[in-house]
Image (cartoon, helix red, strand yellow):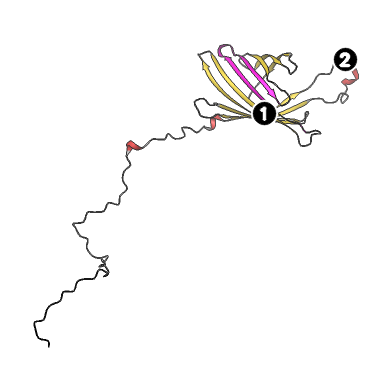
Amino acid sequence: MLPGAARAQTVEPSSDAAPAELSADAPLDPSMPELDLSTPEPDSGKLTPIPPSADKASAADWSGKVGVDYTKPAIPAATFQPDQLTAGAVPDQSTGVAWATVTAPGMQAPLGWDQTSIETRIDPSQERSKLGTTLSRSVPLGDDVALTWQNGISMTHSLPNASGQVHGWASSQALRFNFLPTDTSVSLGADISSSDDKWLRTLSAEQKLLGGPFSVTGSVSETAAGEFSKSLRAGFRRSW
């Protein structure tokens, strides 16, 4: 043995030593705060309620109609002969135009359109089809008058089996005043098409009779030659 008192040596732990592992069964330290894993309640002051379907149009705002406009011309008196009364002597000159219209709500905006109408027409006699849309907005002017602004555009195409190909477009602008107590409406507008180089003015008035089924309409429209065309017609409309 070496002389001298033996000196105790203190072994310092190395910094590279692995940390002590805790066993899953080891008891938790009661001095540690409890960990809250529950979902916090939302702050009601920062939430903005969203009304259900506030900006969605209901199905009741949509409507559709289909029909056929049937026209049968009269026999001219100058060419009328008694033998034409026999069956088959006079060729059938009746024509029909099939049409369909779908009406839907317009854009929900302060100054937007409140109604949209899409219409298609097929005329076999003219070998043409037409597809158009009309945007409108109605504003009441008091209790007895309503103002409607209409903006329409349409496209015309030839049918697939047509002898000639025709393509065109048309646009219209109109202001319509509806006088509710008397069922009278007055419309001021202008039309333009691909065959015209300027806007053509129109003026029309409609009077409904007997609560609506019958109506009388008079109109004055400007032609491309600068003249005015006048018309007066009566109509009957029934929906079921």
Name the side, left or right, on which 44 lies relative to 183: left
Q: Give coordinates of residue 51: x percent, y percent.
A: 42, 34
Q: Which mark is residue 194?
A: none
Reply yes or no: does residue 177 show up in magenta.
yes
Location of residue 189 by image quarter: top right
Q: Nearer the viewer, residue 164 or 224?
A: 224
Is residue 78 visible in this depiction of the protein? yes
For the view shown, which residue lies furthest in the front direction?
Answer: 3
Q: Give coordinates of residue 120: x percent, y percent.
A: 67, 30
Instruction: Kindly identify the amino acid type of the residue bearing the numbered disc 2.
Output: Ala
Q: Is residue 2 above or below residue 164?
A: below
Name the side, left or right, on which 47 lies relative to 2: right
Location of residue 63 by image quarter: top right
For the view shown, which residue lies furthest in the bottom direction?
Answer: 1
- Circle 1 residue: 154
Q: Quick one: label 1 or label 2, which is nearer the N terminus? A: 2
Q: Give coordinates of residue 18: x percent, y percent.
A: 27, 69
Q: How dense is the environment of label 2, judged by Cα within 10 Å: few (below 14), some, or many (20 and up)?
A: few
Q: How dense is the environment of label 1, judged by Cα within 10 Å: few (below 14), some, or many (20 and up)?
A: some
Q: Residue at x 32, y 36 (%)?
A: 45
Q: Nearer the viewer, residue 128 or 62?
A: 128
Q: Residue at x 63, y 21 (%)?
A: 173
> In 3D space, how far apart are the residues under numbered discs 1 and 2 (Cα atoms)?
39 Å
- Circle 2 residue: 78
Q: Give coordinates of residue 150: x percent, y percent.
A: 60, 22
Q: Nearer the viewer, residue 147 or 225?
A: 225
Magenta residues (range): 164-193
Main SS category, magenta section: strand
Instruction: Kindly identify the amino acid type of the residue bearing the numbered disc 1.
Output: Ser
Name the side, left or right, on which 31 lies relative to 90: left
